Image (cartoon, rainbow, N blue to C red):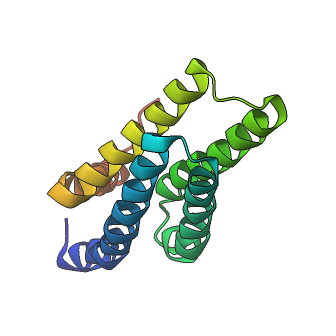
Amino acid sequence: MKADGWKYMEKFLPILDVIRVRLGEILSKNKDGMASWDLVKLRNVGDELIKLSADLYPQLFQMGHRILYQSIREAGLGIVWRISLIDSCGEVKIEDKEYFESVYEALLNIHRKIESGEYYRALIEIAAKRKQDDKEPFIS
C-alpha cells in the first residue's frame, strides 16, 4: 500500500478510539443492567448505542466503512425493540436474557478487537487486498 494509502487508513484510528471508549462505557452499563435485569438501564443502553452509531455515521460513511455503524445501530435498535416486547408481556423470559447476553458478547467482541488493534489490522489487510484486486486485470 502506498504512503498516501497508509495516511488514509490512519484516519480510522481516531474514529476507532472514540468507539473503543464509548462502547466500553456502554458495555459497563449493559453489564450492570443485565445483573439486575433493570429494563430502564437496558433501554438506556439501546438508546446510547443508537446515539453512538448516529454520531459516527458521517465519519464512517466518509471512510466507506458502514458495517461498524450498522452493527452498533442494529444492536441498539434490537435492545430497544426487545425492551418494548418485555414491557408488553410484563416479564423477562429466559430467551430475553439469552438475547441480551448474545448482544453483549457480540459488542464485547468488537470492543476487544478494536482495543487490541486487531480490528485496525484487519481494515489494513482488506484495503491492501482491494488495492491489489484493482491492479489485477479483469479476465473473463
Taking the spot 42% from the left edge, 42% from the top edge, the residue there is 35
Residue drawn at x 47%, y 55% as measured from the top left: 68
Q: Is residue 2 visible?
A: yes
Q: Is 59 left, or right, of 15 in this rendering?
A: right
Residue at 53% of width from left, 28% of height from top? 97
Could you say which is closer to the camera, residue 19 or residue 46? 46
Q: Extreme right residue here?
A: 88
* Residue 95 in picture, x, y percent from top left: 58, 20
In this rendering, would 3 be left or right of 57? left
Residue at the top extreme of this rendering: 94
Residue plotted at (52% across, 72% down): 56
Q: Is residue 76 above or below residue 65?
A: above
Q: Is residue 122 above or below residue 90?
A: below
Residue 128 visible here: no
Residue 118 image offset from top left, x and y in percent? 19, 51
Q: Name the spot of residue 81 as percent of width and height, x first.
A: 73, 42
- Residue 8, given in percent of the width and then of the height, sits at 31, 77
Q: Image quadrant for the N terminus?
A: bottom left
37 vs 115, nearest the viewer: 37
Picture mark count: 0
